[in-house]
Amino acid sequence: MKKGRCLRLENGKRLKDILTFLEREYPCAKTALDHGSPFQMLVATILSAQTTDARVNMVTPGLFNKFPTAADMSHAGIEEIEREIRSVNFYRNKARNIRKLSGILVEKWSGKVPGSMAELVSLPGVARKTANVVMGEAFGKSEGIVVDTHVKRLAWRLGLTKNTLPEKVEADLMECIPRNRWISFSMQLILHGRKVCNARKPLCEICGLAGCCPYAAEIGRDKNKNEKDQP
Ligand code: SF4
């Protein structure tokens, strides 16, 4: 591990403790988004932006029942797609992107989802985070690390980054997390963020990472720590 951006990991032991805990606590961490193919995983991930996974899982059965493949979706009317997904945030924009990318998949990749970062981010509505999720879940491949709101918050609290911009947080994590853990690490952090390290009130007193967490140590030193200090 290089020294520098991967902060306060003096001799690597703290990082090892973090990784060991996460693997033991969440050995089978996977996305909570229901899907039956790489195409459906891609669509579900696009729908999940600014929307909970639970909400997405409520609309995708109907959507995928009507339009299970890229070819089916590319022939759907925008209003039909909108009707199926209207309870998710930004559904109009998402419906347009989903139909457009379906047409591109049919035209350029015979309806299949491509498996590289460069190809995925060339699709409408697909940014780096979405591409990382799809590559990991659908193909078991990683060219980066998923940084969502949970990963960003936990990486900062655990002292793995000083940055708050997702691209910079991802670069910091890629520098210190072993490559064979890139997929599982972010899924495990997401689960831990939902279950224990909540945004408003982290449950440090019951957290198995408290012994290697600088944020918990700081909270312990200063019970009145201002929550505004964190991203
Ligand atoms: S000790 Fe507290 S701040 Fe650190 S990871 Fe656990 S819950 Fe989050």
Image (cartoon, helix red, strand yellow):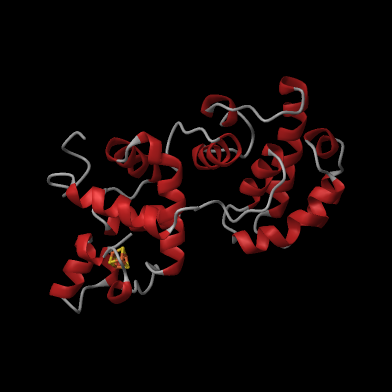
- Residue 53 vs 70, above or below: the answer is below
Please name the residue shown 17% across and 68% down the image.
218
- Residue furthest out toward the bottom: 223
Please name the residue shown 59% across and 30% down the image.
120
Please name the residue shown 58% across and 52% down the image.
49
Q: Which residue is nearer to you in this view: 209 or 145?
A: 209
- Residue furthest out toward the top: 108
- The C terminus appears in which quarter of the rendering? bottom left
* Quarter of the rendered structure image containing ligand 1: bottom left
- Residue 178 placement: quadrant: top left
Q: Which residue is nearer to you in this view: 206 or 73?
A: 206
Q: Position of residue 93 (x, y in %)?
A: 69, 47
- Residue 61 vs 218, above or below: the answer is above
> Is 70 displayed left or right of 121 in the figure?
right
- Residue 109 vs 81, above or below: the answer is above
Please name the residue shown 53% across and 25% down the image.
118
> Is 133 displayed left or right of 47 in the figure?
left
The answer to whether any part of residue 91 appears in the image is yes
Q: Position of residue 199 (x, y in %)?
A: 39, 67
- The N terminus appears in which quarter of the rendering? top left
- Residue 132 vs 27, above or below: the answer is above
Q: Position of residue 29 (x, y in %)?
A: 49, 53
Q: Position of residue 111 (x, y in %)?
A: 76, 28
The answer to whether any part of residue 88 appears in the image is no
